[in-house]
Image: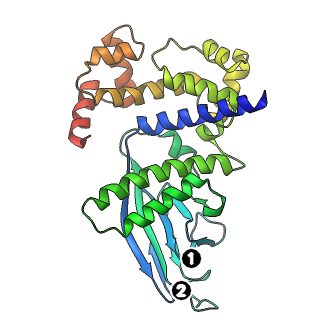
Amino acid sequence: MSAPLALQTDEERDSVLETVLAGYRMRVEITADVRFCGTWFEREPATRFGQFHLLTRGECWVSGEALEHAVHLRHGDLIVFPSGVQHLLSSSPDPHLPPADEPGDTNMLCGELEFVSGANNPIFGALPACFVVRSEQSSPAFRQLAQMLAETSRDRRWGRQMVQNKLADSLFTMAVCEYVRATERPRGLLAAMTDVRLARVLAAVHAHPGQDWTIQSMAHEAGMSRTAFAELFTATVGLPPVQYLSQWRATEARRLLGNRRLSVATVAEMLGYRSEAAFRRFFKRLEGIGPGKARSRAGEDGP
């Protein structure tokens, strides 16, 4: 009986991750295809968006405040700085000293990532300041996607940048999945996704945000008592269940309001509000602006 349960948990976890990443519009962009030779180092300043580096050839070392010690990366490895903290790339563990052996050439794809909508993103909030996905320890699908991205970087035909960015978007999603599977101490929403009871509730809430959810109904979904569920959810996710539900409904509202074929009243009904006025009050309380203003801003930002 354990195998079907594990499979169900994987599906529920992936479902939650998929809906969160879809709910917040994400920008992932390859910004540089760099090549180094000999002894070298490159300082990466702090930025307001996340950064990542995929080694497509050779090796390098990465150091910075987010790392306890310098990290050695090899071909196929990916390092991600979700909050964009400053770091240093170099050809040796100590950038001030030459390497013991003459280093070979190193190539890497560098990029940026950010969520362009939503003030409180539960995925970024649950990720560490830095994490590494090792090629040799990752899934075959991750390695294949990384290889496709590396091969695309050598293709000089029209449309290469667009294809690269779409592949990088998928690679980041897979990197988060790899991190969740590998880490011993996930936190926040990622920790909840590893608990079969909480994953089941999150999957249900994300799939049906307009349902008349209560702590009792969520606890029933988890197969727990009301008190035990509320305590576990709050301690793991960092928010009480009802507050998380409200934030998720606001996230879904932003996404739905981007579709101008849906009226505000229709969006309100889809999210379980009995009146458009009640929905407008809810949205403005959480977002600081009304649905109409949010829809206008979504149009200005583009699809």
Residue 8 appears in the figure? yes
Position of 139 relative to 121 (above/below): below
Q: Earlier in the sequence, mark 1 or mark 2?
A: 1
Q: Which residue is mark 2?
A: 104
- Tell me where residue 118 appears, x and y as whole percent: 40, 38
- Out of 115 and 4, give the one closest to the viewer: 4
Helix, strand or loop at label 2? It is: loop
Looking at numbered disc 2 in the image, what kind of residue is underneath it? Gly
Image side of residue 242 versus residue 265, left or right: right
- Tell me where residue 56 appears, x and y as whole percent: 49, 70
Image side of residue 269 versus residue 247, left or right: left
Position of 236 relative to 274 (above/below): below
Q: Name the residue rendered at 69%, 22% in the picture.
A: 229
- Tell me where residue 294 appears, x and y as whole percent: 28, 31
Residue 86 appears in the figure? no
Quadrant of the snapshot with the N terminus: top right
Quadrant of the snapshot with the C terminus: top left
Q: What number is the disc on residue 59? A: 1
